[in-house]
Amino acid sequence: MAGSGTAHLRPLDEVLLRVEDLVVEFPAKGGRVVHAVSGISFDIAKGETLGLVGESGCGKSTTGRAILQLPPPTSGSVVLHGEDLTKADASVVRSRRTDMQMIFQDPISSLNPRRYIGDVVAEPLGVWGPKDRDEQWRIVAQTLERVGIDPDLARFKRPHEFSGGQCQRISIARALVLDPELIICDEPVSALDVSIQAQILNLLEDLKRDSQLTLVFIAHDLAVVKNISDRVAVMYLGKMCEISESDELYARPAHPYTSLLLGSVPEPDPSIDVSSIEVVEGELPSPLAPPSGCRFRTRCPRVTDVCATDEPLMRRVGDDHFVACHHPLITPVEVGQATR
Amino acid sequence: MNTRIGTRETDDPLLEVEDLHTTFTLGHGSVRAVDGVSLTLHRGKTLGVVGESGSGKTVLSRTIMGLNTASNVTISGSVRYAGEELVGRPSKHLRSLFGPEMAMVFQDPMTSLNPVVKVGRQLTEHVRYHLGLGKSEAEKIAIALLTSVRIPEPEARLDAYPHQMSGGMRQRVCIAMALACGPRLLFADEPTTALDVTVQHQILNLLAEQQRDRAMGMVLVTHDLGVVAGRTDEIVVMYAGRVVERAPTTTLFAEMRHPYTEGLLRSIPKTSEAKHTRLNAIHGRPPDLLSPPPGCKFAPRCPYAQERCRNEEPPLTDPETPGHSFRCFYPIGTPENRAAYESNLAAGLPQTLAAAGQLLATEEVA
Ligand SMILES: Nc1ncnc2c1ncn2[C@@H]1O[C@H](COP(=O)(O)OP(=O)(O)OP(=O)(O)O)[C@@H](O)[C@H]1O
Ligand SMILES: Nc1ncnc2c1ncn2[C@@H]1O[C@H](COP(=O)(O)OP(=O)(O)OP(=O)(O)O)[C@@H](O)[C@H]1O
Ligand code: SF4
Ligand SMILES: [Mg+2]
Ligand SMILES: [Mg+2]
């Protein structure tokens, strides 16, 4: 049945990860179903950063976790290096976890408060790394250096002795210690002050450049996402609205939702007349009973009848720019028409 | 109804704060959370208070409103509301001002809402208590208030519990409650920080509209320079309990003079910049208020800091443009500032290298 289309996917041999028609549902009271993620597809090439943006509850974290099979999705495929993790044995999935790590929003509470930093960072090594303790410490120390934490000072300290920014550096070290290919960053700077946020964003950029890391970067701050991402996917209520190369997306949003979302970003520029900017009217519908057709139609300024009956599929509107909308702000390129 | 203080509609300031200090005495020392803050707010105007976590924004608002009453708190200085001195007045008197004179909207709507009481009852009781109205009269006002904050189907909403509403909806209810008795001064402490950008945009528009219609004075507290840019008349930038810069909003953005304000603006990513634009992170982190550095509180992180900054605290002055004050010996835009930068760069001072983008991200932390 209607997914959101796959016109934007690249050949499998050009990407590190491909997620296709991903569906994640959760049971709710009274036999109802939370439609958290409803048929989204995307891919990521090696060394690329994909930003996932959208407002609270649109399914960003659920998507990130489904890549790691935490929990495995209700349906759809997650193909890493050509292997579908949703069909693989549990043991294969577990060994794949060394290739995929996750960083969370709240740096302090995501670290075990009772353990020393040296042990916190070494934890993944205990399962997958060398068994020799000295060898483990050598790797941990090296990794702490890479994130700007003095290993000898930190080794026998506990998380609460560090600031939020330092704890986020430590969680990044823990994610890096197994030398993963893919890191899923779920709002890694949302809880940090802006001066510290900049330090962490710079750090992630440096790490990515130095070790060909591939990142999924989840955030609700559109400026942060643009800064770090090569491509950005915009989600709304469990669906993907638009995916594009970042500069293009921000310069020429094609989906009415993306456009309204960008307009809402408070820019540090007093010459912008905020009262003239269009607002998104109404409330977010419940994921228990999402609207038919296009899920944005209940709030969309461009809505027509077809939006209620047919779900829009991804169409190309630019070189690396795709939108799922019946009435996009940019005219789609006809199939077969050359864009370059 | 004319029981209000200072009802004369004059050009006198609605709020005047002078050299306000709030100090918490703790077992192991004392924290000067608000350290000599002065500000002025006129009717119908919005003042933005900006600063990072721990800079003293909330303590400042709560002190002005007389809400810092614990026994380990020492307050000095002056807070004049419509000409009346509030510092030192009994808290009973201050409480009588809440609602009809001053009101507050908090970051987390649940600080002002009771989770187990229906929204309608909370609103009507609030209105009845403050305005002394009967039940059906209060209900009418509650519905009118919910309508004014654009809550759809307000009658039906009276029967809802807070948890049955979205975060944005709950914040609207809090705003309705704060506006219920027609206050003349509204404190909004990070009113949209927990909300999505589209909802934030709606709520800030709503506050601006209500403020205009009611000619309220508003203090908008936030850590986000973007939020205050388009929505305030004047901005106060705080660092470590002090005002480091204060100016009319357009002036502040056009000619910022304090290195911290500059650092704050330069460290935030902007949608107008190309992807992967290197951010100018501010080196290190804010001082521990239990043992703040001597001299300028920003000196350990400031790209322009000189010997003098480390020993002597710069006063808050407006040497060039009246109304634009800052606290710095080497303000942005001066030849002295340029010289300080050059010499720090040559000396390889880490915070200067960081500002110049010549420091690795691993070295930005102090
Ligand atoms: N374990 C769960 N059980 C039931 N519902 C869930 C569960 N996890 C998530 N949901 C629901 O799925 C939807 C998507 O949630 P998700 O956490 O992925 O959103 P998000 O985009 O990450 O939001 P936020 O920005 O608030 O983190 C929401 O409606 C959420 O309430
Ligand atoms: N009751 C208290 N006792 C002791 N110290 C306190 C108390 N309340 C606040 N402080 C301290 O006062 C300083 C200023 O805190 P405040 O809450 O005003 O910061 P803020 O600017 O509002 O930060 P945020 O952006 O995190 O809300 C902080 O260092 C804080 O730890
Ligand atoms: S130049 Fe000196 S006084 Fe000015 S902010 Fe920097 S350290 Fe403080
Ligand atoms: Mg999330
Ligand atoms: Mg605060």
Image (spheres, helix red, strand yellow):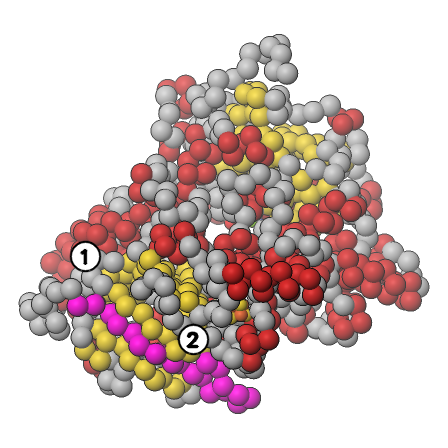
* Frontmost residue, B201 versus A301: B201
Where residue B215 is drawn, which disc sits there?
1
Q: Are marks 2 and 1 on the same chain?
A: yes
Q: Quadrant of residue B76?
A: bottom left
Q: Quadrant of residue A292?
A: top left
Instruction: Say which residue label 2 marks.
Output: B315
Q: Residues within 10 Å of mark 1 (few under 14, many from 20)?
A: some
Q: Give the position of the C terminus of chain B as an image quadrant.
A: bottom right
Name the residue type under label 2.
Pro
- The magenta stretch spans residue B18: yes
User: Residue placed farthest to the top in the image?
Assistant: A336
Residue B79 picture location, percent across and down: 27, 77
**Left or right of residue B133, residue B353 in this image:** right
Residue A210 picture location, percent across and down: 78, 47
Name the residue type under label 1.
Ala
Q: Which residues are magenta?
A: B12-32
Residue at screen point 24% across, 49% down = B209
The alpha-carbon separation of the residues under discs 2 and 1 comes to 33 Å
**Left or right of residue A312, residue A335 in this image:** right
Of all chains, the one bearing label 1 is B
Residue at screen point 82% across, 53% down = A178
- The magenta stretch spans residue B238: no
